[in-house]
Amino acid sequence: MARPALHQVVVSATVGDAITDCAFLLRRWLRQMGFTSEIFAESVHSALAREARPLAAYRPRRAGQWLIYHHSIGSSVAEWLLHLPQRLIVIYHNITPSEFFASVNPALAQQMEMGRDQLCALRPRTVLALAVSSYNEGDLRAAGFVHTDVLPITLDESRYDMPSNPELLMRFDEKGPLLLFVGRLAPNKRQEDLIKLFYFYRRIEPSARLVLVGNEWLLAYERSLRQFARVLGVEDKVLFTGRVSQQDMVTYYRLADLYVSMSEHEGFGKPLIESMYFGVPVLAYAAGAVPDTLGEAGMLFHHKNYELLAEVVDILIRDEALRQRMIARQRDRVQSFLEPRVMQKWEGFVRQLGFT
């Protein structure tokens, strides 16, 4: 007897991408549950050629009348899905509001708007819409979805169980606190606000360093950030890493004294749970899904008073008792995002839909 099929569709399969990582993890769970499961993508990074298949290779089968679709941006993939007979399970990773990109990349802003229109168009074909955060579930309900729930991003511990990069450790073998932010260089992430906060913090602690880990996604924005750092006179203490290997990212978390986010829109914020996992205290602007992800852990702020925040940064780095209390709360919170708990939720959704 043929195994039931439940395949996934993503717009692009990319190394280090949170959506791609989510799809890989779901594929493993589905295969463990006895499904035939593959990942199909419109574009596939060469390094993932053996892990994901081109969208053109997908062939509907009577035995598999369902598809899982990861939605996060407007694309021809969503249009293609609307012309298939398959019923859909939509996993919604959020669409960044277009106004963040209107001035730096109008074409991308248009894709964001298209994505919101397509989300509504997918509604009649969707039997279950899962959001990666309660904040995102609000978007689904606003778009008219009735059957919704939350399946959070999962932290796969096996991907972090590796030694640090010794060369990177030696490079940072100097005194001075290290502030960290992880995320592609994009206007909604507000890396310029991080640089500004860092400028004020260096008035308190001149030896401080800021590391911005993330793909240089929009070159015009990246250039403006570097220019801003030069204008403020901190360019020699701000490191733009670009895309890094998994080992290097793990190493940066281990080197960090504090994780700071000034982002003004997050659909989930995976680096927040990575920081909690590595015992790095988190200071974050309370925007988007950030309060949902952090819960009662970490420290949130609602106003960007840079001089005051610089004082808070200094306290969070120097006050060891406070740090340990925060780390303890964060380690409790991160349990909600580890594989055993999230996989149990996923299996419940599959049973609910009548697959098992």
Image (cartoon, rainbow, N blue to C red):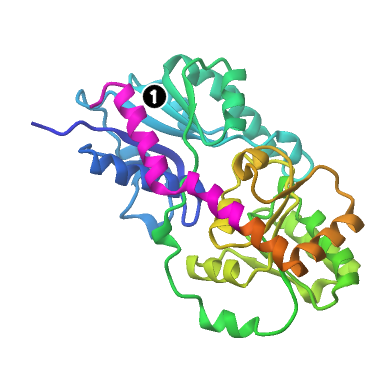
Secondary structure beneath dot 1 equals strand
The quarter of the picture where residue 135 lies is top right
Q: What is the x, y in percent for residue 26? A: 36, 42
Taking the view exactly as shown, the residue that stands out farthest to the left is 1
The answer to whether residue 271 of the structure is visible from this angle is no
Based on the picture, tell me whether residue 72 belongs to the magenta stretch: no
**What type of secondary structure mainly makes up the magenta span?**
helix
- 271 above or below 142? below
Name the residue that disc number 1 marks.
Answer: 88
Residue drawn at the location 67% of the way across and 51% of the way down = 298
Q: Quadrant of the N terminus?
A: top left
Viewer-proximal residue, 149 or 87?
149
The residue stretch that appears in magenta: 328-356
Q: What is the x, y in percent for residue 220? A: 75, 55
- 39 above or below 230? above
Near mark 1 (Cα within 10 A), the count class, few <14, some 14-19 or many ≥20, is many
Q: What is the x, y in percent for residue 352? A: 33, 22
